[in-house]
């Protein structure tokens, strides 16, 4: 999977927390920490906006997580996920 490169600025306090996660070997590097944080943020927003149509919400969340981790994210497509 081809990824785009982003440049971000962070204050020293947050960067120290990111570095401590890497140092404790929870993550391999800073990029992994930030990617996971963004995935979690997007997932939280999507789960919070999921309508309950009588479907198994746990299964729906698993599908969303799998989709987020395996391919590029299209927010419009994610908003319509499971509505077909």
Image: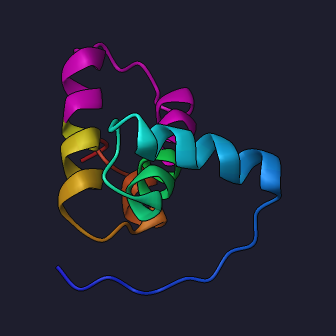
Tell me which residue sits at (24%, 53%) in the image: 69
Please tell me how many numbered marks the rendered image carries. 0
Model colouring = rainbow
Quadrant of the drawing holding the N terminus: bottom left
Tell me if 70 is positioned left or right of 31 in this view. Answer: left
Task: Kindly identify the residue that appears in the image at 75 percent across and 72 percent down.
Answer: 9
Task: Report whether 58 appears left or right of 44.
Answer: left
Instruction: Compare residues 79 and 45 and report the one nearer the observer.
Output: 45
Please state which of residues 77 and 17 is positioned toward the viewer in this rendering: 17
Relative placement, left or right, of 42 versus 4 is right
The answer to whether residue 43 shows anywhere in this view is yes
Is 17 magenta? The answer is: no
* Left or right of 75 on screen, residue 81: left
What residue is shown at x 38% (from left), y 58% (from top)?
29
Q: Looking at the picture, how far across and down is residue 65, in whole percent?
A: 27, 40
Q: Which of 11/67 is in front?
A: 11
Q: Quadrant of residue 25?
A: top left
Residue 6 quadrant: bottom right
Where are the magenta residues, as a range?
Answer: 40-62
Reply above or below: 42 against 77: above
Q: Is residue 31 above or below residue 23?
A: below
- Judge whether residue 44 is colored magenta: yes
Residue 48 image offset from top left, x and y in percent:
56, 28
């Amino acid at each position: 999977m081809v990824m785009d490169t982003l440049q971000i600025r962070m204050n020293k306090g947050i960067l120290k927390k990111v570095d401590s996660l890497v140092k404790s070997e929870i993550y391999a590097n800073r990029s992994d920490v930030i990617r996971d944080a963004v995935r979690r943020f997007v997932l939280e927003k999507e789960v919070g906006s999921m309508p309950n149509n009588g479907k198994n919400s746990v299964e729906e969340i698993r599908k969303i997580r799998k989709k987020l981790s395996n391919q590029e994210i299209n927010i419009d497509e994610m908003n319509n996920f499971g509505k077909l």
